[in-house]
Image: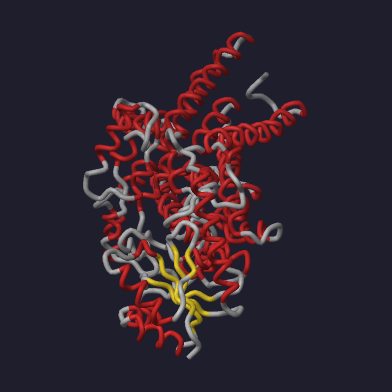
Amino acid sequence: MKWIGRIGMGQQLREAALYPLAVAMCVGILFAALKLTRADLRTPLAYSGEALFSGAVVKSVVTGGAGLREFFAGDNFNFLLVKILGLFTDHFAVALNLFYLLTFPLTTLAALYAFRQFRVSPFPALCGSLLYTFTFYHFSRGERQFLAAAYYPVPLMVMVILWVCAGRLVGRRRVILSLLVCLLVAATGGVYFSFFAGFLLLVGGSLTALRRRQSRALLAPALLILTLWVGHLANMSSAAKYSPADAESYGLKITQLLLPVDRHRVKQLALVKDEYRWNPLINENRDATLGLVGGAGFLTLVGWLLYHNLAASLGRPNREPGPLDHLSVLNLAALLLATIGGFGALFNLLVSPQIRAYNRVSVYVAFFSLFAVVYLLDRGTRARLTSRRRRVACGLGFALVLTVGLLDQIPRHLPPDYAAVRAEYRSDAEFVSQVEAAVPPGAKIFQLPAATFPEGGTVNVMGDYDHFRGFLHSKNLRWSYGAAKGRWEAEWQRQVAALPAAEMARALAGAGFAGIYLNRWGYDSELAKLEADLTAATGAAPIISRNGRLLFFKLRPA
């Protein structure tokens, strides 16, 4: 097969066939990695912590219920995809699972398209797109941060940025495509993807203008940045407020980029990563690991930046920069912005604290790094493909790189214990069904302990967002949990929950609540007394979930 040549009918067909092949390989790897044959799509793949919040958000979008979208700015396109999935199912778990699984082939297609726009041959382009799809970040974010895991627009945005760097943003078709990509990025990834894209466009456009000594070179990136900004404003909602110090807490660590994934298949590497977790400021930034292949690309870009300067100093100052030159500069710019104590911390202090988790720039760094690898592999092998035997050997070589890369990036014991998740999920569903049968439709249920929302943290051993279990399984009940911190409803709940059981029951009945939902994991030594007092105050034994964790006390009418 000729990899590069004039576009003819045969080559167009081969090009068109490349994308279904990529999707088929992606789906096959996904089934193997998550062991999806064991999963039940009517049960969430993850069912604790932030995954419960994700389920509540998806349910609110599918059913038009609770207004949880106010905590997400700039994700309207992803919510549209969820809404479309909701046309075929009203089950939140099915919609959440399908959306999360869909992000994998979407990422593969976007990365493959971006690579092909820079004439990367099919085999290395396919290899790079699959490695980028199956980053540790994608699995670690999972359904607990399903919107952050939807980073499929990033390869397209990098493609546009590289066009700007090379001065190749010309022609109506390419300009329109670039504007559409900017609008897509502005409508996904919250504020992060568009903010990082705007910064990188500014860097790339400024360097191009300086190199060419043409201020008009800034017009194209300025137009794209304006499009990102306008698109983001159109997608904004009233997001949560953050502190400038969060830029330090959730910044990027170069160490995390190069360390192995959590629970690595090689025991010694797993121990190295596990030992590092005791260092300060370890949080979601541990998801940024690039893997073996991506790490090699990252170090290559660092070395290439030094080589570029050395080449200029040795008498080649007029050498036209290529993709690796641009990628190396963009890679450095991303590090200077996002690393702990970097320019991002200054931005948060002096401009706005809303860009909180700078470590999420790792999805851009990962694509830069893998782009460098596939570009060099492509350029290094293309001239040698002079016979069928060499082409086969080259294809096997890329298959080996892909296999080793995937085994390195995908941790062992990745799939959850589907049986345990299913049992817990069904226990909660059965319990809520009993509660609905015991109270009138639309009844208000007060939840104990009174937990802060959002990001309330663990209460005893009850995880954050655990109270969403009731909302997820109910059809017509109203739940107290979800009142945002700082609002009067949250303070009222805290005061009522602190009352003695008898007074609490009277106050809640007077406020129109039909019952009290209690999570035993939220209490310690006071649990037995509280249960006895609530039983006495309500005059009846509680409904208890099959797993014994949840209780429901029906209140007497006021």
| Image quadrant where one finds the N terminus | top right
* Quarter residue 413 falls in: top left
Between 413 and 151, the one lying in front of the other is 413
The number of discs equals: 0
Q: Is residue 491 left or right of residue 77?
A: left
* Quarter residue 384 falls in: top right
* Residue 162 percent location from the top left of the image: 49, 42
* Residue 502 percent location from the top left of the image: 36, 84
Q: Is residue 123 above or below residue 256?
A: above
* Residue 521 percent location from the top left of the image: 36, 61
Residue visible at 32% across and 29% down?
Answer: 269
Q: Is residue 133 above or below residue 466?
A: above
Colouring rule applied to residues = secondary structure
Q: Is residue 188 left or right of residue 1?
A: left
Q: Is residue 79 above or below residue 552?
A: above
Residue visible at 29% across and 64% down?
Answer: 524
Residue visible at 25% across and 39% down?
Answer: 276
Residue situated furthest right in the rendering: 9
Query: Can see residue 406?
Result: yes
* Quarter residue 279 falls in: top left
Query: Can see residue 145?
Result: no
Q: Is residue 314 left or right of residue 184?
A: left
Residue visible at 52% across and 35% down?
Answer: 33
* Residue 432 percent location from the top left of the image: 54, 66
Between 288 and 207, the one lying in front of the other is 288
